[in-house]
Image: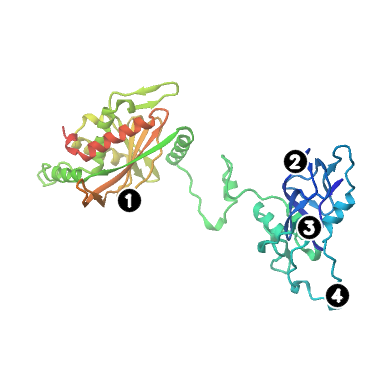
Amino acid sequence: MNILMPQLGETVAEGKITRWFKAAGDAVQPGDNLFEIETDKVSMEVPATEAGILSEIRVAEGEIAPVGAVVGVIGAAGGVPAAGAAAMAAAAAKPTAAPVAAPPAADRAPSAARAPQPPIKLDPFFEVRTPARNFGPARLSGGVTVTPLARRLASEAGIDLSTLRGSGPHGRIVARDVASAPRPAPRAMLAEGATADQVKALFDPAGYEEIPLDAMRRTIAARLQQAKQTVPHFYLTADFTIDRLIAVREEANAAAPKDRDGRPAFKLSLNDFIIRALALALQRVPAANAVWAGDRILRFTHSDIGVAVAVDGGLIAPVIRNAETKSLSAISAAMKDLAGRARDKKLKPAEYQGGASAISNLGMYGVREFAAIINPPQSTILAVGAARRQAVEKADGGVAFASMLTATLSCDHRVVDGALGAELLAAVKALIEQPVTMLV
């Protein structure tokens, strides 16, 4: 017995099978739902009217077939031939209720003014569902109408309906018009390696200007894309209490010797303390003072710390060598020298290559918390946010305000496991919260 695509209305010419409830080879009984269809107007489940075996599925899920097309075949069960296709077709194509005679043509109201019809009863086992969003055709400018199914399919495929010519009654755009229309290039995502012309085609030429890439931006793009794709990042975040650090910094700056013009010999920043804290922490947790080298891990004796510096057109991270051996004032002087030459693009390659870890500080921009991308071959980077005043609970249960900052440690899981990363971050926290230990 052939299973036919049913006729659900006088203007319905096709339907889309959205789901098969039975697979080829399954036994079916009268009343069992065979498949679900979606037409221009309605969604419905089609049941079997005869017993047998679903021997063949000719229209798969997601495919569209015209009314009357054979979508599947029910074969004999147990040697008893199944009934012919006529009963199935008649049951699917006609409502069980007696049809109401149509009024003379002269008395008919225009189709646009027809009242919505109630759900169509196809047989006692199911009822057509007519969601409000799929009730009737929508009208485009110019008077052309579009069926709901065609509109949904066009939306999913990114097809502009105004470019289509309808083949339905009175020029209506139906699903087959959308199915046969050429598909546009995807707009949401482009494959890796898309050309400039492919990207530019997605935008209005009057709405942008083209900025050529310099060597620095090309290098940043290549290295960070490679890092994010090949380095297994994970992130650890902690809050630091920095009241003591602020006090020590203010006292140290106040005590700095002055030159003949009264200018201080140094002016320590919070970042100088953080650089030294990370350098000393790597000495306390030597297993984290390492990098991935393909088929081995390199573990270092000294703490070489990269510090991200924003420059015109990009970012560069000069490295402070042997940072754990340098005083806070020496770190401050080295950082000022490296940052100045970085902005003037006068750094030598040896001054920004290497290092086991790095610091990126966006606190001066008011950023509270962020996670940085590791710069290979380094295995960690500490992202530092802005200092803030925050209410905290005291040991006696009271509440007081404290100066806090949040830092996130990005780790390369090939080198630094979770527990090791946590140990390193805890060591940094201890040094920041007890800054006197960084002075010895």
Q: Residue at x 67, y 61 (%)?
A: 131
In the structure shown, which secondary structural element does the residue marked by tag 1 occupy? helix
Give left or right: position of 412 versus 39. left
Asked if residue 380 can be seen in this view, the reply is: yes
Mark 3 vs mark 4, CA separation in Å: 28 Å
Query: Which residue does the numbered mark 3 point to in the structure image?
Result: 124
User: Residue 222: percent from the left, percent from the top?
Assistant: 47, 37
Look at label 3 and name its amino acid.
Pro
Circle 3 residues within 10 Å: few <14, some 14–19, many ≥20: few
Look at label 4 and name its amino acid.
Pro
Query: Which residue does the numbered mark 2 point to in the structure image?
Result: 23
Q: Which of marks 4 and 2 is nearer the N terminus?
A: 2
Q: Earlier in the sequence, mark 3 or mark 4?
A: 4
Asked if residue 349 can be seen in this view, the reply is: no
User: Residue 361: percent from the left, percent from the top?
Assistant: 32, 43
Circle 2 residues within 10 Å: few <14, some 14–19, many ≥20: some
User: Residue 68: percent from the left, percent from the top?
Assistant: 85, 53
Q: Foreground mark, 3 or 1? A: 3
